[in-house]
Amino acid sequence: MNHLTFPSHQLGEFSITAISDGYLCASLDLLSNIDPAEASRLQQNAGVADPSSIHINCYLIRGRGRTVLIDAGAGGFRQWGGEL
């Protein structure tokens, strides 16, 4: 069995884990409510080498005896993601 490591962050008593559902290649103009230049700057500051590669992430929150999945990915919309 492969053991994958996902980026996690502890926030108080909650563990937040980012899970990838793939990515799409598109212009940052696709995003709403953010200037494409600002979106590119944010991605580059986060170490993303190719700003046209937009990652589709969802988040697993664990704490207080509960597990919650926030945003179950793209569901294969326009052939984007859909693996989760």
Image (cartoon, rainbow, N blue to C red):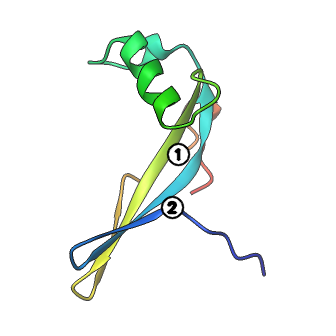
* Residue 75's disc number: 1
Cα–Cα gap, marks 2 and 1: 21 Å
> Dot 2 surroundings within 10 Å: few (below 14), some, or many (20 or more)?
few
How dense is the environment of label 1, judged by Cα within 10 Å: few (below 14), some, or many (20 and up)?
few
71 with respect to 43 (left or right): left
- The three-letter amino acid code for the residue at tag 2 is Pro
The answer to whether residue 79 is left or right of residue 17 is right
Q: What's the amino acid at mark 1?
A: Gly
Q: Earlier in the sequence, mark 2 or mark 1?
A: 2
Residue at the spot x=41%, y=21% of the render?
A: 39
**Label 1 near label 2: C-beta < 8 Å?**
no
Q: Which quadrant of the structure image shows residue 51?
A: top right
Q: Is 14 situated left or right of 79 in this image?
A: left
Say which element carries label 1. loop
- The quadrant of the image that shows the N terminus is bottom right
Q: Nearer the viewer, residue 46 or 63?
A: 46
List x then y, in percent, for residue 17: 43, 65
Residue beneath the point at 21% across and 74% down: 12
Q: Determine if residue 73 is in view.
A: no
- The residue at 56%/64% (across/down) is 6
Circle 2 is placed at which residue position?
Answer: 7
Q: Nearer the viewer, mark 2 or mark 1?
A: 2
Residue 29 in the image, given as x and y percentages of width and height: 44, 11
Image-quadrant location for residue 80: top right
* Residue drawn at (56%, 57%) of the image: 84
* Residue 61, percent from left and from top: 33, 69
Is residue 28 at all visible to an observer of this figure?
A: yes
Direction from residue 41 to residue 16 in the image, left or right: left
| Residue reaching furthest to the bottom | 65
Q: Position of residue 74 (x, y in %)?
A: 50, 42
Give the SS element for disc 2: loop
| 22, 47: nearer the viewer | 47
